Image (cartoon, rainbow, N blue to C red):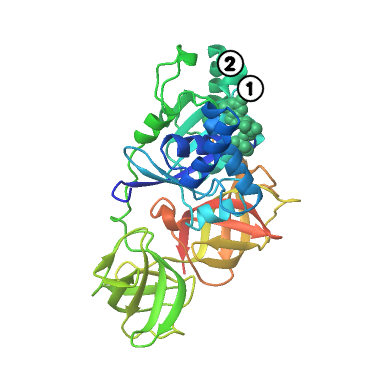
Amino acid sequence: MADKPHQNLAVIGHVDHGKSTLVGRLLYETGNVPEHVIEQHKEEAEEQGKGGFEFAYVMDNLAEERERGVTIDIAHQEFDTDEYYFTIVDTPGHRDFVKNMITGASQADNAVLVVAADDGVQPQTQEHVFLARTLGINELIIAVNKMDLVDYEENRYDEAVEEVKSLLDQVSFDTDNAGFIPVSAFEGDNIAESSDNTSWYDGETVLEALNDLPEPKPPTDAPLRLPIQDVYTISGIGTVPVGRVETGVLETGDNVSFQPSDVGGEVKTVEMHHEEVPNAEPGDNVGFNVRGIGKDDIRRGDVCGPADDPPTVAETFQAQVVVMQHPSVITSGYTPVFHAHTTQVACTIESIDSKIDPASGEVAEEEPDFIQSGDAAVVTVRPQKPLSIEPSGEIPELGSFAIRDMGQTIAAGKVLSVDEA
Ligand code: GDP
């Protein structure tokens, strides 16, 4: 599995439209359901004379294990197809999805949107598509699910497709990058094999569409950006910052700079999985040692980059935000906590510059007095402590953030431009 390119896949859609069932089906069809789950339930199914109903038993078992809180949860499931090795990232609705997606813990490359044919576009369908768009998902596979419940009727499929298309238009998502497939996750239609039940459809199956996704390009061409997760002192080595390379390459001998702490030096060693390596690439979790840097010189939330192209430190920045849930209204002067890469910094929304019409992407109102749940807006933000963050147009991996208050994620956003400190 490991030699195939890797894809982080988000499975999004309204509750009960069949996300877990589809993931279960994909695991099952690709032979990635844990053996003990299959074995145990094959036996049970056969005992009860329902040998052919294996998948239902697998799903029951996954659900049961989930209820017991033991293992199964669709997030973090893995499966491989002919082309790729997929990891299902946190799913919206999942605790901290937005924060994880933004802080990189589960940044998705592409997504499958599940829409039940008998229910169509629902509020969460809208919210998730909006979020996927804001957070930079490029390609969508739209599984129009539960076709069995609408007797596999083409016109019911077409209706659902039209609803989704107008939603995608609303958020300016290029429908050329969206593939629609009529499926029944439960019955297995058009998942691994073309179904006779939908003879009017001659497009791809879900597995074919997954295989045809573009290969995510590791951002090795961008300058090095390595947000620091922790700083250790290890005897015999010294100070060892650890973190994940988001962009670029970290190499021994490089001259690096940590921002906003504003210290730097030469990389002496890079270690990955307890072994010394000459360099590290995007996605690699590393510990490294820099000549002359002590434990108190740097901290979590610093970003390491090349000394001649150091991470940007913002005096203020302009950002596009989407308010997801806020009990009242947001006005200028509001100072919640911003979560970006490995850092958390209180930031003041200094001004609300414009409200954006999600239908057209155009400015709907200049300098509105307030924004509230469901609104998209451009705001100017002043961090209360030095914050390293990048314009998302230049380094998307370091250009998004979640805004949290009262224990929940209230908004998500991406950085449009930075006024440097
Ligand atoms: P989620 O909340 O989006 O993860 O939805 P689930 O996967 O838990 O499915 C919700 C319900 O719809 C469950 O009772 C599933 O058995 C059922 N379901 C899912 N997919 C299908 C399908 O293709 N056909 C039918 N008839 N039911 C389905």
Up-down relation of residue 412 to residue 210 (above or below) = below
Up-down relation of residue 420 to residue 206 (above or below) = below
Outermost right residue: 328
Q: Quadrant of ligand 1?
A: top right
The one of 181 and 56 positioned closer to us in this rendering: 56
- Secondary structure, mark 2, is helix
Outermost front residue: 47
Whether residue 359 appears in this view of the structure is: no
Q: Where residue 118 is drawn, which disc sits there? A: 1
Task: Report whether the residue tagged 2 is closer than 8 Å to ligand 1.
Answer: no
The one of 52 and 420 positioned closer to us in this rendering: 52
Task: Report whether the residue tagged 1 is closer than 8 Å to ligand 1.
Answer: no
Amino acid beneath label 2 = Arg
Whether residue 384 appears in this view of the structure is: yes
Q: Earlier in the sequence, mark 2 or mark 1?
A: 1
Q: Position of residue 211 (x, y in %)?
A: 35, 35
Q: Position of residue 47 (x, y in %)?
A: 58, 33
Q: CA distance from mark 2 to mark 1?
A: 8 Å
- Mark 2 near mark 1, Cβ–Cβ under 8 Å? yes
Q: Position of residue 389 (x, y in %)?
A: 46, 62
The residue identified by callout 2 is 156
> Pointer 1: residues within 10 angstroms few (<14), some, or many (20+)?
some
- Secondary structure, mark 1, is loop
